[in-house]
Amino acid sequence: MRPFYTEYGFSLTYTSRLADKVEVYTGTLLHRDGHFKEAEIALPADTSGGKNAIQAKGSTMSYAKRYLITMLLNI
């Protein structure tokens, strides 16, 4: 998807913060003309499959990015 949205002047950034013991992930869709749109999603750590704490966080971050991009691009 990156080649498609960058061709039209868009870029994506992601951040996270802890709120009420749950990680809240924020995605920002930016346009080179200065416009932007944000979306947030709160997700618990993905501890399925016997993941350690670092693996659980990484897995959750991957999920968050996928869901945020679909929210921001309305797909």
Image (cartoon, rainbow, N blue to C red):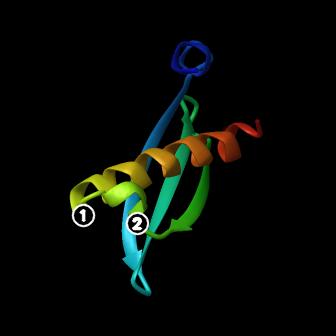
| Residue 42 percent across, percent down from the top left | 54, 69
- Identify residue for label 1: 53
Please identify the residue farthest to the front as the structure is shown: 49
- Identify residue for label 2: 45
42 left or right of 47 in image: right
Q: Amino acid at mark 1?
A: Ala
Name the residue: 77% across, 40% down: 74
Counting labels gives 2
Quadrant in which the N terminus is drawn: top right
Given residues 14 and 35, the one toward you in this image is 14
| Residue 57 percent across, percent down from the top left | 32, 58
Q: CA distance from mark 1 to mark 2?
A: 8 Å
Q: Secondary structure at mark 1?
A: helix
Vertical side of 48 occupied by 36: above or below? above
Q: Secondary structure at mark 2?
A: loop
Given residues 52 and 11, the one toward you in this image is 52
Neighbourhood count class around disc 2 (C-alpha, 10 Å): few under 14, some 14–19, many 20 upward: some
Marks 2 and 1: in contact by CB < 8 Å? yes
Q: On residue 9, which mark appears?
A: none
Q: Which quadrant of the view contains residue 54?
A: bottom left
Quadrant in which the C terminus is drawn: top right
Name the residue: 49% across, 37% down: 12
Name the residue: 60% across, 54% down: 38
Given residues 7 and 49, the one toward you in this image is 49
Q: Amino acid at mark 2?
A: Ala
Name the residue: 61% across, 56% down: 39
